[in-house]
Amino acid sequence: MQGSKLYVGNLGYSVTSDQLEELFAAHGTVRQVTVIEGKGFGFVEMSSSAEAEKAKEALDATEFKGRTLKVDEARPPRERERRGGGGGGYRRF
């Protein structure tokens, strides 16, 4: 694993950042936790790639709050396609 940031999927919508931090802290030092509200996933950044790998191996496919977690290395965000503003393609004469 190259990075120290993990994607955590299949979270219950009621899971908080504090609960996720507590879960991952058992496997190393947690730098940052972000839960995407209403989406069922979040991100956990560990202090090193070794700790991230350890946490991934320990927690992937385990049950947390009644859901089976999907833990994987986070991918860098995709660059969004820029679109021209306004216009809509129609022209009035």
Image (cartoon, rainbow, N blue to C red):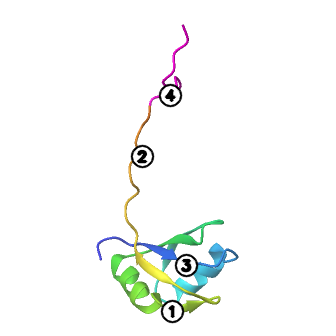
Q: Quadrant of residue 92?
A: top right
- How far apart marks 3 and 4 lie (CA) works out to 35 Å
Q: Mark 3 Cα within 10 Å, few/some/many (few <14, many 20+)?
A: some
Mark closer to the observer (1, 4):
4
The earlier-in-sequence mark between 1 and 2 is 1
| Position of the C terminus by quadrant | top right
Q: Mark 4 Cα within 10 Å, few/some/many (few <14, many 20+)?
A: few
Q: Which mark is residue 62?
A: 1
Q: Secondary structure at mark 4?
A: loop
| Position of the N terminus by quadrant | bottom left
**In this view of the protein, can residue 32 be seen by the observer?**
no
Tag 4 residue = 85
Residue at left offset 41%, top offset 57%: 77
Q: Which residue lies most toward the right here? A: 14
Residue at left offset 48%, top offset 24%: 89
The reply to whether dot 4 and dot 2 touch (C-beta < 8 Å) is: no
